[in-house]
Structures are given as structure tokens and as C-alpha cells.
Amino acid sequence: MTATPEEGDTVDASAPAVSDMDLLRRLADANGVATGTWDWYGTWREASGPSLLAVLKALGLPVGPDATVEDLRRAMTATEEAPWRRPVPPCTVVRQGSTREVPVHVPDGSWVTVSYVLEGGGRGDLRQLDHWVPPHTIDGQAVGRATFEVPADLPLGWHRLLVTIQGGAVHSGTLVVVPDRLEAPALQEGRRHWGIAAQAYSVRSRGSWGIGDAADLTDLLAVCADRGADFLLVNPMHASSPVAPVEPSPYLPVTRRWVNPIYVRPEAIPEFAALPDALRTKVEELRLAAMGVDAGGSLIDRDRVWEAKRKALEVIHSVPRSYHREASLRDFVRRGGEDLANFSLWCALVERKGDLRLDPDEVCAGGAKVDQARIELADRIDFWSWCQWVTQEQLQQAQTVGTRLGMDIGVMADLAVGVHPMGSETWSEPGMFAHGMTVGAPPDMYSQQGQDWSQPPWSPRALEESAYRPLREMLHAVLAHAGAVRIDHILGLFRLWWIPAGTGADQGVYVHFDHEAMVGVLLLEAQRAGAVVIGEDLGTVEPWVRDYLSSRGILGTSVLWFEKEPSGWPLRAEQYRRDVLATVNTHDLPPTAGYLEGVQTTLRHRLGLLVEDVESVRAADRVEMEQMMARLREYGLLTTPDPSTQEVVEALHRYITRTPSRLVAASLVDAVGDRRPQNLPGTNREYPNWCVPLCDPEGSEIHVEDLPGDGRFVSLLDIMDEGVR
């Protein structure tokens, strides 16, 4: 059965698909693919035909670059018939306290019953509604639709729907009952909270291994707690490559389900104490090798650090464990299940190959060669599972210390948008991803050529088919040792900018996800963990999206430099949104001291990232600064005619404490007067992204044990505490 051309449609069926852009756009709309977007100048830009075809192919439709108009018509028919070809939807998400209609498809005229089975036991029947829908003919057979109603009194959880059709056939689907609104315990009292945002890898101690680790994180939490902070927002701790070169960006992990053992402190592993003197000496020699001979303030060398730390971990792993420690490890591996087994096997395979690019017969988790490798690499699989265990123990200890010392939230984890294209997730579950696509962002005023983050997107169809299991498991893992989660680019739960392989970021297309289901799963896992959720909702966002997130109990994000009145002036403090995390800057901007000096424009000009005249950009920078200084003077936060950089930084933070925002944070780099950016968007190797240690204004490194005596740090944290309390 093929789609009937609309009246007046005279396009030749054998003509190239782009000959009928109206039909191509209708097909895109029907599959959740946007046919264009508004650019940052407010101009509507149509998506190109080749981009639409590439994205639709990645979604599983039978079209491609050589598709004809007839192919489009067949794809439209397949799209319309898809719901009728399955008895019950693979996943139904319903808000607690609400009902939800469920369409069930059966041979026309057959009787059918639907029941639910709760995850904790118990079952019941769904009521059939009196909704008549004309039958459809599928493959020559009449298929009817019956409509059932999910009752409003079901408990939160992951349940099942069972469909029994006349003749005895039984089918099932997942039923997820999610919170209507997230009610995080930390926010129930109504008072405001403040915290610090830090790149954990950059905050080193004199005892660390050349990179900030879990022990340093624990100390940083304690230092911040002593000054009254309620939380510490840190970069993603997701796993990276088990071999060099180690990806420096914490936002490009190999998986978001497991953590990065580079953050473990070897000496804090209980078995370290049982090492013979000779092995303890060897571990200390490895620590010195990890630190290198560079002067303090040198860039972080992850390859050097990990090479030494991995060898030290192997030494400690070889030590016999006590009975209770061995039992705890076995329990951890059991709970990690197939996912941990696959991740550890992937690490072992990559280690053996010495490269993320595995051999063709090892690129699938289910291949015969891989099954053989499970036996051959059993010892290494055990090692990599153990690494996860000891790292997560130490990260959990950090959270425990933070909350024990009075933090209401403790660690605020950061969740990356996606994963590395050759990581363990794409290896173990390739069917979950849209092939031939990467995720990024369209051009905007800060990245005027657009951004390609090189991450393959999840397929919205595969997510639904799996009942959102990858999303659920990822959230459960991230919240295991955190009291809150910041979701980078939370608009990704609504839509993502897909860029076809071989094209520029400006040729991307927005693909929509079932945000009601995605947000619902997020809320269910956060509610069960008792966690606060913050969504990074910066950039061009439709007003309804922010209203929707707020209505569901998800806080947004306000960055001072991005909050503008229609006139372009800085938004008045009292006009900030209440349900947000408000900050002066973000990891995608330089430290405020550097921003005040215009380092962002200087660097982008030097690296050829500007598409506008540099003097025009600098003139706009000057206007922005003049307006901001005027606003600070209006609020009485600057009183001297020529304030110092430190005075301006402190005034900006006093300003955000005057907002009604429920959460307020200061960046650690601002608290110590650092100037160098941690990350320069739109660059890869042109700038040392994610490799800059925490330094003072002169570029000398500041260790975590120096912070309590650092005057700038103490002053800014006292300002935050006084302003919020």
C-alpha cells in the first residue's frame, strides 16, 4: 500500500525526492524532524533536502540520498501504518494522579483485555473506553483499535501492561508512572541555597597524582561546607578511554553509565595499607611520575597521570582482600550486571588493541570473537570492574562527607549530553544510536559557525522500544553519589541538533524526542534518589519549554551575562526567574576576571572563530561592560570611579545574590581570581580545553589545602553566604 498523492500533486514518482519538498517536509513533520529553524538574527532558515533525507534515514525510514518521490510516498505510508502494526505501545508514560488512554490494535472484531502488573506486586484491569475508530487495512487484513484507560491511582514505578487477544495471544508493554512534579527534600523548606561550581580535575592537592581526584574533591567539599555552602557543582565524572590518548573533555565520555577511575586516590583504597614496603615504595614512585617535573600551574597531562595511576591500581588490585571486602566487590559486580560486564570487557579489548578502534570482529558486544575474549581476558575484566568499585566507593565517600558537614545537597553532578562515537555504549548497544549523525548546536552569536560535539545521538525510536532503559540506568548511576544533577543542554530531552556526517554544523536539523516520556523518567529516578534537578536551558528556548520544566519541578539556569532585557541591558536582579540556578558565568565562558578583560574575543579572533569583524565584536564587548557597570552602580554595588577587577567580581556576585533565584553559585575560578578559560567552545586542539589547573591571577597554582587561607576565596564565599542567608 502506498500513499495517495494529494490532489494537484503531479510530481513524477521516479523523480528525485528533493523534487517534492512539500512531501519531504510532511514526512519529516510526521517523524518529529523539524523542517527549519530560526537563526540568532531572527530569520527562518529552511532545512535542506539532503539533510532531511539523511536524518530520516538515520531514524530508520527507507529513504536516503538517492531516494525518489515514490520512496517518500512509501515512507509516508510506513509512518502512518507503524502504530497499527503493534498490539500495544512499547512504553506508556503517565503522570501519577492522571489517567492515560492506551491504543490497542487487534484483528478487527476480536475481543481483547488489558491488565497491569505493578513492579512491587499486585495487578488489576484497565477499563475499555467507548471510542470507536475506523479499522485500517494492513497487508490486506482489517485491523481494529480498542482504547483502554490507565487508572489515576497507580503508584510510582516501572510496571507492565498485559494484552490478551481472542485466540490466546498475549503481548506486553512497559507502563511507567512518574511524578507530576519533582519534590526534592532539599528544596521543601523554601529557603535559598548557594554553592560553588568547580572543575574537579583542576583542583589538585600536594598529595594528588597530577589531577584533582576523589580525595581532593572530599577536601574541597569540606572547605566549602565550612564556609556555609550547600552544594558543590562539579564537571561530569563519566568514564573515559582506558588507554592513551585520554580524551580531555569530561563532556565526551565513552559512557555515562560508569565513572572515570582517573579520579581514584590509590592510597585511599583500604588494600593499600596491606602492601609490603617495596610495593608501597613503587606506588609512591608512580605518583611522582604522574606529577612529572613541571612547575606548579602547568597543564594537566591526563595521559601521563593515567599511565602511572593504572600501574599503581594494578599493584593494589593484586593484594588479597578481606572477606567482607571481597563480598562487597562481588555484590557490586552482581548489581552491575551485564552492563558492567560489557563495559569491563570493552575496556579489556581496547587495552589489548591499544586503540578505541577495535577490530571488525570485535565491534559488536554479541559477536563470537567477543564471547571468546570474555574467557581470554577474564583477569583484565575483573580488574576493570574492580576499578569501578573502588572509584565509586571514593566518590560516595565524598558525598557522605559533604552532607555530614552540613551541606543540604552536597555534590551536584553534571550530566553530559552524549558519548564518544567509539565508546563503550556505542559498542555494546549500537542499535540505540542514530548512525551517520552527530550532535551539536546551530550557529549563534558566541559560536558563529555552529558546533559539532562529535557525539552520536540516541534514536528516539530505539529509546521508546527499550522503554527508556538507557536513560533510566544512566540517571540511576549519576545520582548514586550526588544530591543533585545538572543536565547539560536539557533541551536535548526535547530536541537535538543532528548533523549529517560530512556536513558542517550549519547543515544540521532539529530532531524531536518524546519530552513527556523523557522528563517523566528523569523525575521518577530523581524522586527516588531524593535529588534536585537543574536543567541547563541556555540559548534559544521557546518560553513554553521553560514554563514546562518549572511546572515539573526542574530548575533552570541563569547566567548573568546572558540575562538581558529586550533593550539589551542587563536584566534587573529582581526580574530573574525564581526556579533557577543563577551564576555569574559558566564553564563555556572564561573566568570573570578574564571576561572583563575581553579574553574571549581575543582568543576567538586569534584562532579564526569569529565571522564578524573583530573590532565590531570588541565594540559590542565595551557596550556590554559599560551597561553592566552602570547596572552595578544603580544597585549601589560599585561606588568607586575606577574599581579593581576584584571589586567588580565581588559586585557581580552580590548582584546575583539579590535575585530571587532558589539556587545561586559562584565559580571557584572566580573565587581565586583565575583568568584562563577552562574551555573555549568551537575548538578542539587549538586551545588546551579542560587541561588548565586552578590558578591565582598571576598564573600560580592554588592547591585545595591553600583555599582556607586564600583571601579572595574567603571573601567571595562570605559574600555569597551573607547575600543568600
Image (spheres, rainbow, N blue to C red):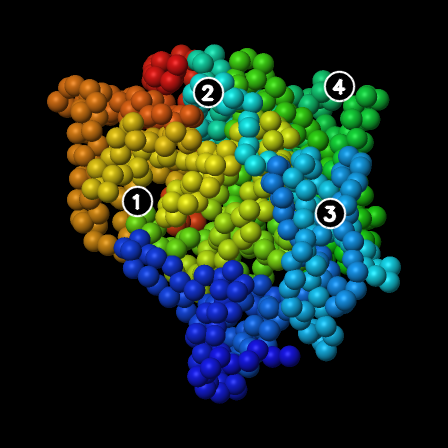
Task: Tell how many labels.
Answer: 4
Q: Where's residue 74, x and y in %?
A: 59, 77
Q: Residue at x 63, y 29 (%)?
A: 529
**Circle 4 residue:** 274
The residue mark sitting in front, 3 or 1, is 3
| Image-based side of 76 in relation to 87, left or right | left
**Residue at disc 1, secondary structure:** helix
**Quarter that holds the N terminus:** bottom right
- Viewer can see residue 594: no
| CA distance separating discs 2 and 1 | 42 Å
The residue mark sitting in front, 3 or 2, is 3
Mark 2, Cα crowd under 10 Å, few <14 / some 14-19 / many 20+, is few
Viewer-nearest residue: 530 or 691: 530
Q: Where's residue 617, x and y in %?
A: 22, 47
The residue mark sitting in front, 2 or 4, is 2
Q: Residue furthest front?
A: 130
